[in-house]
Image (tube, grey):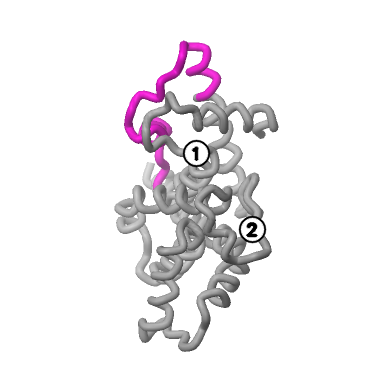
Amino acid sequence: MLSRTDTADLTHFLAEPKRPDGTLSFQELQGFLFSVACSPELIPPSAWFPVISNDEDMGFEDEAEAQRMMGLIMSLYNDINSSVLERSDSMPMGCKFRPEIEDNFDPNLAISQWSRGFMMGHDWLAEVWDEYLPEELDGEVGSTSMVLSFFSSRRLAEMYHLESTTTPRHRRPNVPFSDYAEKVRELFPAALLSYAHIGRGISEIIEELGSSDA
């Protein structure tokens, strides 16, 4: 598990101006790696690692820095992967909701950054989910991914709220946005658990089928 020092070092490294434009922040990386760890299909580091720096060279100073930072990123992934395997509903490291619901849309807040990283990862893996997700689970994955990406921006949250009040299947008339956002915040831990359970559950079934065919 990453120590406080390791976490601080990785956070600082990712935030340095010398990193390429679009490089994920530490919390965005956590959200992105959560989506990768929950994928119905195993995604190797060689596939997801370039995404962290927007498919550009990360700009390591030397081989020593490259080895240390890549090691820290892999340690973070392993920590998140272990949490997913355990089907944990614990909040991501360093992420806490503010009491005032509107404050949680601050783009610099940890939970907002985590949600942006998650949404990026989920969208990046959209074709994988489309290939393996049973139709009967499509609604649940849609709902959980909505909850987990809700605080990525207020504009997106407003779109989700509008859809919930205008789409016949989800219509909830006369629900103020603040009340809707409060409910989403309450559902966040359960959504973490549900998303991990479905994604890794499918992955484990695929693995079992592959083993039986061998």
Q: What crowding class fits label 1: few (fewer than 14 Cα within 10 Å), some (14-19), or many (20 or more)?
A: many
Q: CA distance from mark 1 to mark 2?
A: 18 Å
Kind of element beneath mark 2: loop
Image location of residue 199, percent across then percent down: 46, 55
Front residue of 187 and 46: 187
- The boundaries of the magenta stretch are 41-69
Residue 208 appears anywhere in the view: no
**Quadrant of the drawing holding the N terminus:** top right
Q: Position of residue 197 (x, y in %)?
A: 53, 58
Callout 1, which amino acid?
Ser
Amino acid type at mark 2: Phe
- Residue 48 on image: x %, y %: 39, 36
Mark 1–mark 2 CB contact (< 8 Å): no
Question: Is the residue 30 above or below the residue 200 in the image?
Answer: above
- Residue at 45% x, 27% y is 17
The correct choice, above or below, for 78 with respect to 119 in the image is above
User: At x 49% / y 44%, what residue is drawn?
Assistant: 28
Question: How many labels sit on residues?
Answer: 2
Residue 68 picture quarter: top right
Q: Is residue 198 visible?
A: yes
Residue 28 sits inside the magenta stretch: no
Question: What is the x, y in percent for residue 157?
Answer: 45, 66
Residue drawn 56% across the image and 29% down it? 12
Residue 25 shows which numbered tag? 1
Tell me if 178 is positioned left or right of 137 in this view: right
Residue beneath disc 2: 97
